[in-house]
Amino acid sequence: MRTLGYRIAAVAVVTATAATVAAVRATEATERADAGRMVAAGVEAPPSGSPADLAVQFEALLGQHAVLAANMMRSRVRGDDDFVQAANASLGQNTDDMTGLVGQLFGAPTAEKFRPLWSRHVVALFGYSGALADHDDSARAEARTQLTTFEGQLAAFFSGASQGRLPLATARSLVVTHIEHLTGQADAYAAGDYAKADALSRLGFQHTYDLGLGLAQALLPPADTAVLAQPVWRLRSQLGKLLAEHAVLIEDATRAAVTRTPDFSAAGRSLNANTSDIAAAMDTLFGGTAARQFQTLWGAHVEALVSYAAATASQDEAKQQQARDRLTSFQQRTGKFLADATGGKATPAAMTSALAEHDRMLLEHADAYAAKDYPKAHTIAYETYDHMFHLARTLADAFGGAVAARLPKGGAQTGFGGLAGVVEHF
């Protein structure tokens, strides 16, 4: 597997002054609404809104929660107050979106119970990371006690809503693991062990993402979720996880490059690991030759994006343009590669357009971050995360059931099926 080289020019440390995410959303909602939910032209996705489709959205939102919570906690440890404000606003948006989806899936009464439970556990995570930043062991212990209480309450909520399909002990174990990943990565980050922090953060994202689908399968009637076992749906879910993590890690590397923080090298290693995971999926689907070709293309794409962030921070317009040119080449070459992989179901132009949209959003994120506009950067990051799932849906549907059936069952380490095995269906 290719190891990416990151050569970062002198970059300025950015301290941000932030407005609110709500203000950014108000001024840009019309302009960006379609971009955040784009499906590549020429590849028509099936209608959304079915219970199975909502279940996939639920796992995406839970995975996003893990990312946003980790970002918020790390920013508190760093003392980035403006970043904390914007990250907290994104966490609030995620909670709103998740509550709305819980209402769609399980009804308004369930959503009304969910929101305060979920919000209180977010507040406790905020308090825990603040105690870490202040080196206040007493406050940290108090926050951990609160989190332990919320672990039990959330487990009881999920188990009760499942009508017996998710045992209480299993639910508690899953919630405890989620909390331990978040507090563990914050502890490691505060100690300067960025490699451990990133490893735990990646595990936390993967666990919480899979937890979303497992919970949906437990809480919904089995008849509503049977379709999720079909190959195209499993591929859609797993591609979404890998591509969303790619976007998240690019954005984290952008932050580290722009602010020149010591966690940049660890962020680069996480990007390498994600690229290897995506290439491994391509190997499973299309064989080793195709996977190696894809790895080279995708690695060059990652390098160009990180180079753009560094050039933007140092206000080097020539290097910015060089990075844009490399991305244009990537989009065209990879668009053809993916179109060929679909057997003609998607055109090179459609795939190139989808990749160009992805890169446009990430470049805008880098621009906003370097301009000290943290709320705008978080808004773009939120929409980019959403966009990755539409791209995954497009690719999975275009690859088709025969290709998707090559994907083994289980998680990233145990076979791409998430937590289905812990759910006791009737």
Image: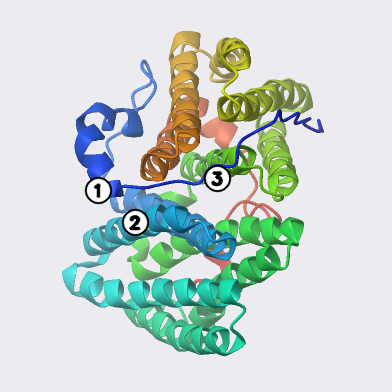
Residue of label 3: 238
Q: Pick the quarter of the image with the C terminus.
A: bottom left
Disc 2/disc 3 C-alpha distance (Å)? 27 Å
Question: In terms of sequence position, does the residue under pointer 2 or pointer 1 come before the other?
Answer: 1
Residue of label 1: 22
Query: What amino acid does circle 1 point to?
Result: Ala
Residue situated in front as seen by the camera: 274 or 93: 93
Residue at image point 23% right, 44% down: 23
Numbered tag placed on residue 43 in the rendering? none
Q: Position of residue 170 (x, y in %)?
A: 53, 80
Q: Position of residue 420 (x, y in %)?
A: 53, 63
Residue situated in front as seen by the camera: 263 or 293: 263
Q: Secondary structure at mark 2?
A: helix
Q: Is residue 190 above or below residue 116?
A: above
**Nearer the camera: disc 2 or disc 3:** 2
Residue situated in front as seen by the camera: 86 or 4: 86
Instruction: Single out the residue that lies furthest toward the left.
Output: 108
Query: What amino acid does circle 2 point to?
Result: Ala
Residues at badges 2 and 1 in contact (C-beta under 8 Å)? Answer: yes
Q: Position of residue 127 (x, y in %)?
A: 47, 76
Residue situated in front as seen by the camera: 252 or 290: 252
Question: In terms of sequence position, does the residue under pointer 3 or pointer 1 come before the other?
Answer: 1
Q: Pick the quarter of the image with the N terminus.
A: top right
**Nearer the camera: disc 3 or disc 1:** 1
Q: Position of residue 257 (x, y in %)?
A: 64, 38
Query: What amino acid does circle 3 point to?
Result: Gln
Numbered tag placed on residue 89 in the rendering? 2
Any part of residue 422 in sight? no
Which corner quadrant of the image does residue 294 belong to?
A: top right
